[in-house]
Image (cartoon, rainbow, N blue to C red):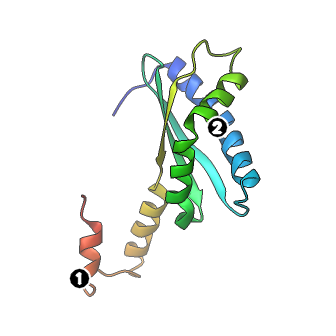
Amino acid sequence: MEEFTQRQKKIGGVLQQDLADILQKAATDGGMRGVIISVSKVNVTTDLSVAKVYLSVFPNGKGKELIEGIRSNTPLIRHEMAQRTRNQLRRMPNLEFFIDDSLEYIDGIERSLKREEDPIKEADLLAKRKKK
């Protein structure tokens, strides 16, 4: 596991707040009403050149479509972020967007513990659980 300096954590927090605001506003303006986008985590590299942004999207079915749109508009998002953080950051890091599926993973574990999904009785569930 990577260790982050205090500066990396602070910059990640600033980016997380502003990105959440920008992305949610863009989704509602883009006609995607009822879609909730939250920035669950932002990891910044030690040289502050790259920021990995993990997004949670509700409903889950819209996630793939939404992340493709966000990735195609990354230069515009980066420019907007640079405008917002111009007094806090000298250079805006490159943004890389990923879907955070930890909530789905936790939900799957809870269903397994409650015996809603039993892999012994339903053998096809085991194939879904194997890492690719």
Q: Amino acid at mark 1?
A: Ala
Residue 102 place in picture, x, y as percent:
45, 55
In the current view of this chain or complex, which residue is farthest to the top? 90
Which residue is label 1 attached to? Answer: 123
**Residue at (29, 77) in percent of width and height:** 125
* SS at badge 2: helix
**Residue at (48, 51) in percent of width and height:** 100
Between residue 46 and residue 27, name the one nearer to us. Answer: 27
Front position among marks 1 and 2? 2
Crowding near the residue tagged with mark 1, few <14, some 14–19, many ≥20 C-alpha atoms within 10 Å: few
Q: Is residue 37 above or below residue 46?
A: below
> In the rendered view of the protein, which quadrant contains the N terminus?
top left
Residue 10 place in picture, x, y as percent:
58, 23
**Residue at (74, 54) in percent of width and height:** 28
Q: Amino acid at mark 2?
A: Leu
Residue 42's label in the rendered image is: none
> In the rendered view of the protein, which quadrant contains the C terminus?
bottom left
Question: How far is the residue under mark 1 from the one under mark 2?
Answer: 41 Å
Circle nearer the N terminus (1, 2): 2
Q: Is residue 128 above or below residue 56?
A: below
Residue 122 place in picture, x, y as percent:
28, 85
- Residues at marks 1 and 2 touching, judged by CB atoms closer than 8 Å: no
Drawn side of residue 4 relative to residue 70, left or right = left
Which residue is label 2 attached to? Answer: 19
Label count reads 2
Between residue 9 and residue 22, name the one nearer to us. Answer: 22
Residue 7 place in picture, x, y as percent:
53, 18
Between residue 8 and residue 34, name the one nearer to us. Answer: 34
